[in-house]
Image (cartoon, rainbow, N blue to C red):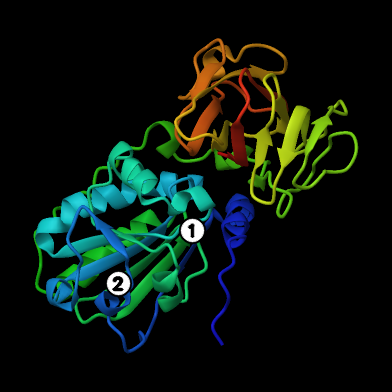
Amino acid sequence: MQEAINPSRRRFLGAAAMAVAAAQFGSVACAKARSAATRLDHATTWFNSPPLTDRELHGKVVIVEFWTYSCINWRRQLPYVRAWAEKYKDHGLVVVGVHSPEFSFEKNVDKVRWAVNDMRIPYPIAIDNDYSIWRAFYNNYWPALYFIDAKGQIRGHVFGEGQYVQSEALIRRLLGETGASNFGIDLAPVNARGPEAPADWKDLRSEENYLGYKRTENFATSGDIKEDRAHVYSVVEPLKLNQWALTGDWTVGSEAIVANRADGSISYCFHARDLHLVMGTAVPGKSVQFRVLLDGKTPGSDHGVDVDEQGNGMVVEERMYQLIRQKQSVIDRQFTVQFLDSGVEAFSFTFG
């Protein structure tokens, strides 16, 4: 029986990453009868390419990459996939990114189009809003890579981050089976910067945490969560490691939290080099100013790419924002983000 779609598997990867570098590498001895191209027929929209069919993919080595654009695990995998697509495209490799959304805003194809352009994704993208391709591959992970030979058989897979050297070796082997050669000695050059830089696994003691009431953990604000209705929350201090709290007037929904008034804040006690927050605005076209504090002070040189040294930033698009990247020793820190306007939506924290 086919396993049901389980978005919490992305969270499983976050937990497993600290022990096994967030990756599983496997070989598939015998693929199912349908070719990769046939499974891709379920795509509703394509970016960077017309729809790819059996005819276009016949005789090609194909990587099918499952992704969702707010996922930090995928963002850190992206520079490797981007590099493989560039290095091996003239040798017969085709990369297809299948965007299967996690959050409801990721079903908006215009937002995915923005992400494809902003994140410099050059290869074909298939939109899978109804998870038809996800189900056809029996997939359960963001990100996931499936390596398919020129005969349409799945020959390997990677769930999560890591195993990049092994993956590129498999690409070369599958291309070699088609007669391709002259790849050069060096592996594909990877340029991983900002949010795409590898996580600091040795100091990572905070896992991904969702903020909607269906999946959140370690909520420490005074009183219980008031589901789907406005409520004024206050912080119970001090927060323990991996606890989070709200201050001000918020509505906690099943998927996200929404600030009903200006000056609402979120606090989180974390232990990681990087802190990210997936957020957007409840009103389309509106922007929300915010200010970040680290242990009650401006972040200075520990600011992320989406804030300045004084901790100032602006929510515009619905996406993942990098708010902290520590430059010195990683210790337990208390993070606070205060929103100067109402209407922000926050979905999940991730770390690296």
Residue at mark 1 to residue at mark 2: CA–CA distance = 17 Å
Quadrant location, the N terminus: bottom right
306 with respect to 226 (left or right): left
Q: Position of residue 76 (x, y in %)?
A: 43, 44
**Residue at left offset 45%, top offset 24%:** 305
Residue 272 visible, this orientation: yes
Q: Of helix, strand and loop, which one carries label 2?
A: helix
Q: Nearer the viewer, residue 261 or 70?
A: 261
Disc number for residue 162 = none
Q: Residue at x 72, y 31 (%)?
A: 268
Q: Quadrant of residue 302?
A: top right
* The quarter of the displayed image where residue 206 is located: top right
- How far across and how far down the image is residue 286, in percent? 49, 27
Residue positioned 36% across, 87% down in the render: 32
Q: Nearer the viewer, residue 318 or 239?
A: 318
Amino acid under disc 1: Trp
Up the image or down, 185 lies above or below 43; here it is: above
Q: For residue 142, which numbered disc appears in the image?
A: 1
Residue labelled with disc 2: 40
Q: Residues within 10 Å of mark 1 (few under 14, many from 20)?
A: many
Q: Is residue 307 left or right of residue 116?
A: right
- Of the image marks 1 and 2, the number of the one nearer the N terminus: 2
The kind of residue tagged 2 is Leu
Is residue 170 in view?
no
User: What SS does tag 1 mark?
Assistant: loop
Q: Residues within 10 Å of mark 2 (few under 14, many from 20)?
A: many
Quadrant holding the C terminus: top right
User: Which of the two discs, 1 and 2, sits closer to the camera?
Assistant: 2
